[in-house]
Image (spheres, rainbow, N blue to C red):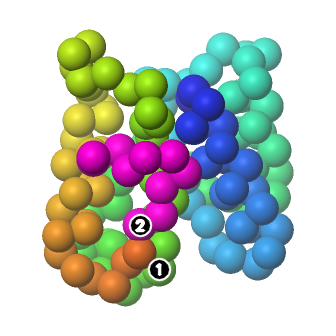
Amino acid sequence: PGNNGGDGLVAARHLSLFGFDVSVVYPASDTPTENSHSTKLAQQAGDVGVKFLDDFPSQSAMDGNYAVIVDAMFGFSFSSERGMSSPYDAILSDLIATHKGDQGTKIISVDVPSSW
């Protein structure tokens, strides 16, 4: 729910408005406070039909079902020295596995690639 996450929610909303079927991985553990900017962006995305998932889809669920992933997890200010908390460590591992699996799914990053 930081700046990159907000950019991802805006991208999801616009993609949905352009007719794409959009899902956002948005862990329940990261639900922002009620009146935060992230909450408002998530509400706007949900209002136009964006689906929210708690977990990254399994590799078998990914196969052929997702044409593009928009990586909006971490940006240039991410510091590996602080470590990566759960569930982002698992999501990042799944994202890397998807990239390596070459299932035809394109990964586009809002900022720098989170796995970089």
Drawn side of residue 51 relative to residue 62, left or right: right
Confirm whether residue 90 shows in the render: yes
In the displayed structure image, the side of residue 41 where residue 3 appears, left or right: left
Element marked by disc 1 = loop
Instruction: Name the spot of residue 90 as percent of width and height, x first.
Output: 22, 41
Q: Is residue 29 above or below residue 76?
A: above
Q: Which of the pair 97/24 is nearer the observer?
A: 97
Q: Main secondary structure of the magenta part?
A: loop
| Percent x, y of residue 108 | 47, 64
Residue at image mark 1: 67
* Residue 25 among magenta residues: no
Asked which secondary structure carries label 2, the reply is strand
The quadrant the N terminus occupies is top right
Whether 51 is drawn above or below 55: the answer is: below
Magenta span of residues? 107-116
Residue ID at (41%, 66%):
107
Question: Which quadrant would residue 37 be assigned to in this image?
Answer: top right
> On the rendered structure, is 89 left or right of 62?
left
Q: Which quadrant holds residue 96?
A: bottom left
User: At 33% across and 85% down in the image, what residue appears?
Assistant: 104
Dot 1, crowdedness within 10 Å: few (<14), some or many (≥20)? few
The disc at residue 107 is 2
Horizontal and vertical percent for residue 16? Answer: 74, 67
Q: What label does residue 53 carry, if any?
A: none
Towards the viewer: 92 or 58: 92
Residue visible at 24% across and 75% down? 60
Residue 5 in the image, given as x and y percentages of width and height: 57, 38
User: Dot 2: within a 10 Å radius of its alpha carbon, few (fewer than 14), some, or many (20 or more) residues?
Assistant: some
